[in-house]
Image (tube, rainbow, N blue to C red):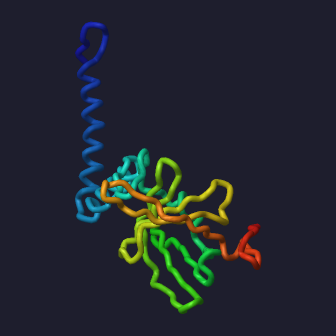
Amino acid sequence: MIESHGGRRPLARLWKASSRAAKVVAIVTTLLSGAVGAVTIVRWLKHTSAHFSDVELSGSLPGETWKVADLSQYDWLQGDWCYPTLPGFRSRFRVMAGSLQRQNMSTAPDKFVTEWVSTNVHISNRGLLRLDYEAKVWPISFVDATPGHPTEWRENERYPQDDGSARPGNKRLALSCSQCVVSRDGMTYSCH
């Protein structure tokens, strides 16, 4: 081995570094050798980068920033939700293949059941969930949940204004159909 001034071995370090680089190149080449590997890597990179970077979304309020939400941030929505101000109406949520889906139904005045609709879920810097429906069959929903109260939340839409700002709509209370009871007069409720 040739030693340089100061007792270092630059050729030995260079050899070791090039050996590591060759291993990395071999791994990447193996992964990229098939179209499936390349597609998998591209999907992973898109998915990973989206979770760490802010996303600009229309209808945002001043100071609001958004990121793609992780399953752990919205899977608590799974189940049936009743709306005390909309008698007979309920929404159901489920997670299928990592995607949150919603179905609406009503028993009055006209009975109906919608198809399951997939959503894109974002979370704001304030903890607000944004449900953007892929089929564009419903307006974008904003879900505001109070930490420690997994049986209730409030939902509203937002309306774009001519100046580019957004005006929030009225919030509707949603309660877990299986864990909450509304009083007969509709003025109070309790959840367990």
**Residue 140 x, y percent position in the rendering:** 42, 67
**Residue depicted at x 46% and y 80%:** 116
User: Looking at the image, is 4 positioned above or below residue 183?
Assistant: above
> Which residue is most to the bottom?
110
**Residue depicted at x 45% and y 71%:** 97
> Which residue is most to the top?
5
Which of the 4 image quarters holds residue 30? bottom left
**Residue depicted at x 31% and y 10%:** 7
All told, the count of numbered labels is 0
Q: Quadrant of the C terminus?
A: bottom right
**Residue 24 x, y percent position in the rendering:** 29, 43
Q: Nearer the viewer, residue 163 or 181?
A: 163
User: Looking at the image, is 96 positioned above or below residue 26?
Assistant: below
Please indicate whether residue 79 sits to the left or right of residue 113 in the image: right
**Residue depicted at x 54% and y 92%:** 111
Q: Quadrant of the N terminus?
A: top left
Which of the 4 image quarters holds residue 78? bottom right
Q: Nearer the viewer, residue 93 or 136?
A: 136
Please indicate whether residue 21 sits to the left or right of residue 76 in the image: left
Please indicate whether residue 127 sits to the left or right of residue 43 in the image: right
**Residue 178 x, y percent position in the rendering:** 70, 76
Which of the 4 image quarters holds residue 75? bottom right
Please indicate whether residue 166 sits to the left or right of residue 75 in the image: left
**Residue 32 x, y percent position in the rendering:** 24, 56
